């Protein structure tokens, strides 16, 4: 059995607040092939969702993850059961049940707006909150599942792919009675030409189906990341994001991000990231410093 | 009976026998190719062993892969280097759900348990010291004199897991220990003329090697473990090498050899690239091969 706790300081509405990122207990020695994790967890959905921000090869979160799963991704309180199938290759099944805090709405922000189908034709009218930004997600109860496989293509390369699904109440369920389903496919190819060189291609495609009493809304999005680690100290990457929003008025965002990371030590790195929005022509720069006090383990990603 | 039928029957029996025999072998997985070689020499034909890393990898930077999980999943024995240098294995072990090789389980062995550790930090330890290892310098496999307690631990563990082969493992351990002991004497004899000689290394990974052969590590290209050298540090190092007559820089092949060569040129020294582990260069297939190669290459350079 093992317990892990991760704290963070996050900015919410202009204020820096402490936050419990994850806190869970892992039961590693269940019946053959099974393990259980319970607590507050970054859910095993897709590839990037469960990876902590400081471990990701870029600073921000791909737009499709924010738009469909929330600003912090899919994080819930509950349990995840994993099963490593008794096969000669890696194939793992995950199933989880979660309680997720829903978004809160100010009462005076409620209003009515038209719901349109994916072809732009009107479906009806629904109650909506005020400006919620671009993030959607799950609220109250949700169930998730993932199947994940990986093959070694030789000593120097590995191919992973997975399918994920999540179903539950939408994060605005209180006002909209919306049920949400998100399904995803991910594929990652890694190649290590030498000890410190690495090429990685990581891609995820997500679909959202949001069902409200008056109709159904379908959205999709994806990201593609190509990274190159040149040596022990330097890594670069480029990511393309394309994501539709989760709201009745369809909006699509496309952006390209360039990332350069300098690993100062094994646990400390500094990162520069530049993002360009193809719709708005807005350019954004990020500077990230990840400061590690000592080496630590991470679950297999 | 026709000859062809006899051959077919014999072939079937041999296939069945070999598959049954293979099934009776203990499956072992190790963090490094060096440890795999130890297990192979002691386990003989009773053990099948595989290493999760290869000889040209920096153990600090091995990226765990799902395919490694399958090797650990079926293992009856897992041998780690320990001392926090192979933390990447932890995620693999947990993902395997193999109770038999989890920490403190019957099939789990930390090879560092009984070795004499060098450079165990004392006092305050913080990030200003670079990527320091709090349990001491973990590169103990660079010093063959550390092999004795490791071999004994592997022999004991194999005997515990496969008690019917206890005598076999003991014989193998005695034979290999004797052979390695003779080679250690041979290597020491070759390095005798260079006792007290000062060297510089890229990373602080050679203290056990240096201690065994009575070499003095005058400095490292990394100012602190894991920190790349700054121009100021390189200048200081070159000055030190000149003033202390340091003529040799030892570096593993996966580090920046061109930086070492640049320093060597300024300081009037030579760079010697030595593989850190079994399989690190072609033809180095065993732990004894590794130090045959490293000692011979170093001797050739120091002359």
Image (tube, rainbow, N blue to C red):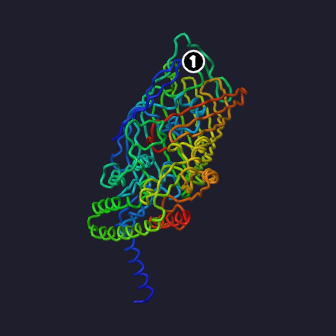
Q: Which residue is mark 1?
A: A128
- Left or right of B265: which side holds A24? left
Q: Chain of mark 1?
A: A
Looking at this view, is B126 or A54 the one in front? B126
- Left or right of A184: which side holds A20? left
x and y, in percent, of residue B205 in the image:
47, 52
Looking at this view, is B12 or A9 the one in front? A9
Looking at this view, is B297 or B93 the one in front? B297
Q: Choose top left, top right, bottom left or bottom right for residue A130.
A: top right
User: Exactly how many numbered labels are in the figure?
Assistant: 1
x 62%, y 17%: residue? A113
Vertical position of residue A286 compared to residue A17: above or below? below
Vertical position of residue B212 compared to residue B190: above or below? above
Rendered-image quadrant of the C terminus of chain B: bottom right
x and y, in percent, of residue A241 in the image:
64, 35
- Left or right of A194: which side holds A103? left
x 39%, y 34%: residue? A24
Looking at this view, is B233 or B103 the one in front? B233
Any part of residue B188 in sight = yes
């Amino acid at each position: 059995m093992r317990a892990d706790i991760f704290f963070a300081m996050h900015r919410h509405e202009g204020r820096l607040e402490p936050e419990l990122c994850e806190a869970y207990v892992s039961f590693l020695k269940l019946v053959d092939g099974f393990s259980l994790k319970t607590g507050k967890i970054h859910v095993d959905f897709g590839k990037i969702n469960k990876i902590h921000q400081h471990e990701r090869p870029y600073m921000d979160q791909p737009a499709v993850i924010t738009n469909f799963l929330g600003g912090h991704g899919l994080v819930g309180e509950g349990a995840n059961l994993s099963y490593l199938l008794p096969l000669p290759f890696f194939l793992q099944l995950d199933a989880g049940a979660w309680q997720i805090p829903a978004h809160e709405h100010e009462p005076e922000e409620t209003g009515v707006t038209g719901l349109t189908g994916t072809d732009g034709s009107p479906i009806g009218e629904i109650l909506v909150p005020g400006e919620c930004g671009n993030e959607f997600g799950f609220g109250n109860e949700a169930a998730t599942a993932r199947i994940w496989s990986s093959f070694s293509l030789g000593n120097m390369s590995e191919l992973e792919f997975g399918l994920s699904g999540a179903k539950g109440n939408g994060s605005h369920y209180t006002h909209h009675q919306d049920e949400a389903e998100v399904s995803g496919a991910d594929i990652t190819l890694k190649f290590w030409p030498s000890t410190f060189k690495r090429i990685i291609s990581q891609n995820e495609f997500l679909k959202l189906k949001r069902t409200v009493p008056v109709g159904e809304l379908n959205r999709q999005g994806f990201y593609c990341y190509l990274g190159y680690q040149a040596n022990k100290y330097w890594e670069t990457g480029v990511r393309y994001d394309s994501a539709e929003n989760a709201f009745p008025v369809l909006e699509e965002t496309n952006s390209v991000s360039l990332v350069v990371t300098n690993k100062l030590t094994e646990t400390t790195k500094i990162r520069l990231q530049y993002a360009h929005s193809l719709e708005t022509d807005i350019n954004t720069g990020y500077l990230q410093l990840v400061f590690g006090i000592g080496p630590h383990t991470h679950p297999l990603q | 009976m026709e000859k062809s039928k006899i051959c077919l029957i014999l072939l079937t029996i041999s296939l069945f026998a070999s598959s049954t025999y293979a099934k009776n072998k203990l499956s072992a997985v190790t963090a490094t190719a060096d440890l795999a070689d130890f297990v192979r020499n002691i386990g003989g034909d009773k053990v099948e062993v595989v290493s999760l890393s290869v000889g040209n990898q920096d153990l600090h930077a091995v990226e765990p892969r799902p395919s490694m999980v399958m090797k650990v999943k079926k293992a009856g024995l897992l041998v780690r280097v320990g001392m926090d240098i192979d933390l990447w294995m932890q995620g693999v072990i947990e993902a395997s759900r193999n109770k038999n090789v989890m920490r403190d389980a019957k099939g789990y062995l930390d090879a560092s348990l009984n070795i004499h550790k060098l450079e165990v930090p004392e006092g305050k330890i913080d990030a200003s010291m670079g990527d320091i290892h709090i349990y001491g310098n973990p590169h103990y496999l660079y010093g063959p004199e550390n092999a004795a307690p490791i071999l004994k631990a592997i022999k004991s563990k194999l005997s515990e897991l496969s008690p019917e082969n206890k005598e076999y493992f003991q014989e193998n351990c005695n034979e290999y220990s004797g052979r390695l002991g003779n080679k250690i004497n041979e290597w020491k004899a070759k390095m005798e003329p260079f006792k007290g000689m000062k060297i510089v290394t890229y990373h602080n990974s050679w203290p056990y090697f240096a201690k065994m052969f009575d070499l003095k590590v005058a400095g490292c290209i990394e100012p602190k473990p894991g920190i790349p050298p700054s121009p100021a540090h390189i200048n200081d190092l070159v000055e030190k090498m000149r003033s202390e007559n340091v003529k040799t820089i030892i570096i593993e092949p996966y580090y920046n050899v061109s930086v070492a060569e640049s320093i060597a040129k300024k300081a009037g020294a030579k760079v010697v690239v030595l593989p850190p582990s079994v399989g690190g260069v072609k033809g180095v297939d065993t732990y004894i091969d590794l130090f045959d190669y490293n000692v011979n290459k170093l001797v050739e350079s120091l002359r």
